[in-house]
Amino acid sequence: DQQQSQVFVFAPDGEALRVLSREGEGPGESRQPEDMVFLPDGSLGLAQYINGRIIRIDLDGVPLGTLLPPGYDPEGGGMYSIRRVRSRGGSLVVNGAKVSPSADGMLRTQVLVRGNMAGEVEAEILSRAAASQLVRDGWHEKRNYLPSHERWDVDGDGHILAAPERNDYLIVVYGRDGQPLRSFGRAFTPWRRTDAEKQRLRDAVTVLRDGQRMDVPVVVEDNEPAVQGVFVRPDGEIWVLPGT
């Protein structure tokens, strides 16, 4: 339950066993977690989108402290948001964005990064930086693309599989050091959006200033992204959800 910031635990037969965590700022509590992950030490991590942190608890709900995203220094200013976290094959991979001060205002950097339990970066897989001046520059869908949400996954060897190009059916396999190992794909024509679908996307971009909604230019693409999801099954088989 994202609104209540609660995790429900069910038995294999569907019986509800218990509820873990709750909304708040105290030990083991979180606010609107975006994702959750079993961490290398066996703890459960609740990843917050806003005020990006990974709140760690055990399976009885006992607080185990907080893990910062790899490479994030809260003392350096700015904010961090987390979209997705995966841990498999000894790799802890975080997808999120950092917003930090720059000479031109604010800089938003999206990252897909491999790190460790100490919050240290072990390999940067992908990143994209753009000025975060939406009122002035507007929001451009293609410029802001980085494989986030379900457009990447981790296999049993700790390799990261991601769809780095918005308009191409292309999956790149990155090694633990962040370097590409191989890629695969196919010819594909993604779904062409209707005018109504494009307008819904424009309407979904909300910019507030002093509590008031600001009108900003929003540029959306004619087509859906070619790849909507990448999933690695326990047996190593790779499933790809195309943009249809």
Image (cartoon, rainbow, N blue to C red):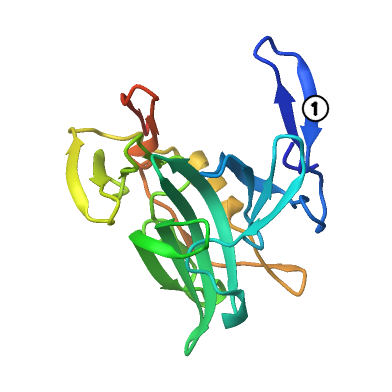
Lateral position of residue 138 relative to residue 35, left or right: left
Lateral position of residue 43 relative to residue 110, left or right: right
Q: Position of residue 102 (x, y in %)?
A: 49, 85
Residue drawn at x 59%, y 52% is 203
Amino acid type shown at disc 1: Arg
Up the image or down, 118 lies above or below 45; here it is below
Q: Position of residue 143 (x, y in %)?
A: 37, 62
Extreme top residue here? 13
Lateral position of residue 193 relative to residue 210, left or right: left
Of 149 and 37, nearer the camera is: 37
Element type at marker 1?
strand
Binning the other alpha carbons within 10 Å of mark 1 as few (below 14), some (14 to 19) or many (20 upward) gives few
Q: In the rendered image, is residue 168 in sight?
A: no
Of 136 and 226, nearer the camera is: 226
Residue drawn at x 31%, y 43% is 159
Residue drawn at x 27%, y 56% is 177
Q: Position of residue 141 (x, y in %)?
A: 42, 56
Q: Name the residue under label 1.
A: 18
Extreme bottom residue here? 103
